[in-house]
Image (cartoon, coloured by chain):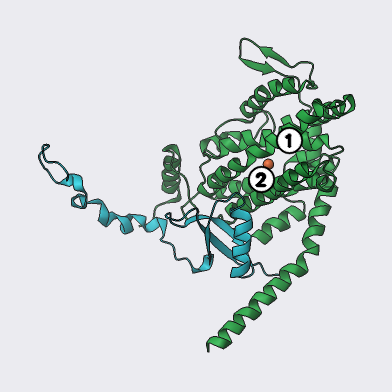
Chain colours: A cyan, B green
Amino acid sequence: MKKEWPIWEVFIRSKNGLEHRHVGSLHAADSKMALENARDVYTRRSEGISIWVVESKHITASNPEKSGELFEPAKDKVYRHPTFYNLPDELKHM
Amino acid sequence: MKDSTENLEIEFQHKIDQGYNIEPKDWMPEKYRKTHIRQISQHAHSEIVGMLPEGNWITRAPTLRRKVALLAKVQDEAGHGLYLYSATETLGISRDELIEQLHAGKAKYSSIFNYPTLTWADIGAIGWLVDGAAIINQVMLTRTSYGPYARAMVRICKEESFHQRQGYEIMLTLCNGTEVQKQMAQDALSRWWWPSLMMFGPTDAESTHTELSMKWKIKRKSNDELRQQFIDNTVPQAGILGITIPDKDLKWNEKTGHYDFGEIDWEEFWNVVKGNGPCNKQRLDARRSAYEKGAWVREAASQYAEKQRNKEFTEAN
Ligand SMILES: [Fe+2]
Ligand SMILES: [Fe+2]
């Protein structure tokens, strides 16, 4: 039998109050092993207090070649930013 | 209308010139992809094979303190191998193919690991010199253009500095010990010095990859620059230990602000690269045997996972 273990993406929360961040990937036969391996490889120096693993094939990613169309609509909407509005300098707390 | 390859290439180079990183799903020239698969996997293999010469001393470490430190270091190197294999896999090659290339003798790894670790002092010399040389190369690579490679390097560099410090501490202890212990340290330095200088690869004049590597910002410093940096860092460290670097031409050059050094024996380098070093065969045999002996574990784990999945499926229905 010649079958590679699937690839898992690993996300780690370094401390409460912070979000989980992608730190890397690894191969594992199942989710339990993926968690254990992630613990051994990515938290050897207390880098985390919580781990998420997800099989890479379950991630849907946007296509970088299409990022023009995908992100363009946000670019010309300057009125979504506070600096778009002209207000007097003496105005405080706003 | 679809962009021609030429346009894509211009755009790609522009991105690199502007200092943007390239990410896995971005368009890249085939040669950029191939070069990275080769370079990153070579680097990964080096981390893994590099565990062997040091692993040789884990059970014989002189104290428990030294033993836990060496064990932790070797475990880190396994982690480095994993980060780098993962980075290589983002370029569209499987882990199995990479391992297969190593075991078939088609892939290279750093020649330094084809030298034997004869005494405990070699563990000190490896941490000090070999990890020291690796750090110089790896710090540069934290700014390499391929995103996953650069990120792996950042993680690796954070872990490396303890490796070098534990090695130097071993050397320091031996050099402050008995005459015989100091002699052991000297002998290790004498044997590891030149191979460590060779770790940076052929001279710039001889190196075939340099120009493209610079253009694509894979490397940001040449082999000779990195080697010089290593020598300049290391000579004063040997001074503190009170042992002698085996190079009669080594001397401070007031004008250049660097150390001048003697001729490297490139014939030895190429000989080891071609597979004729003292331990090439032993290292590959050890890798293959570990992989083969682990096959049943990998298969059993796959079977078990499969069984669990089926069970969950049946219970859910
Ligand atoms: Fe390493
Ligand atoms: Fe290291």
Would you name the residue on which mark 2 appears?
B43
Question: Where residue B43 appears, x then y in whole percent?
Answer: 66, 45
Q: Are tags 1 and 2 found on a single chain?
A: yes
Residue B281 visible to an observer of this rendering: yes
| Residue B103 picture quarter | bottom right
In the foreground, B25 or A24: A24
Examine the rendered structure and indicate whether residue B95 appears above or below residue B114.
Answer: below
Question: Where residue B29 appears, x then y in whole percent?
Answer: 51, 48
Q: Is mark 1 within 8 Å of ligand 2?
A: no
Q: Work out whether mark 1 precedes mark 2 in sequence or the reverse, and give the earlier one.
A: 2
Residues under numbered marks 1 and 2 in contact, where contact means CB atoms less than 8 Å apart = no
Q: Residue at x 19, y 44 (%)?
A: A83
Examine the rendered structure and indicate whether residue A43 appears above or below residue B127.
Answer: below
Question: Where residue A35 appears, x then y in whole percent?
Answer: 59, 64
Q: Judge left or right: residue B196 versus residue B57.
A: left
Identity of the residue furthest to the right in this view? B180
Would you name the residue on which mark 1 appears?
B167
Mark 2, chain letter? B
Task: Classify 10 Å Cα crowding around label 1: few (below 14), some (14-19), many (20 and above).
Answer: many
The three-letter code of the residue at mark 1 reads Gly
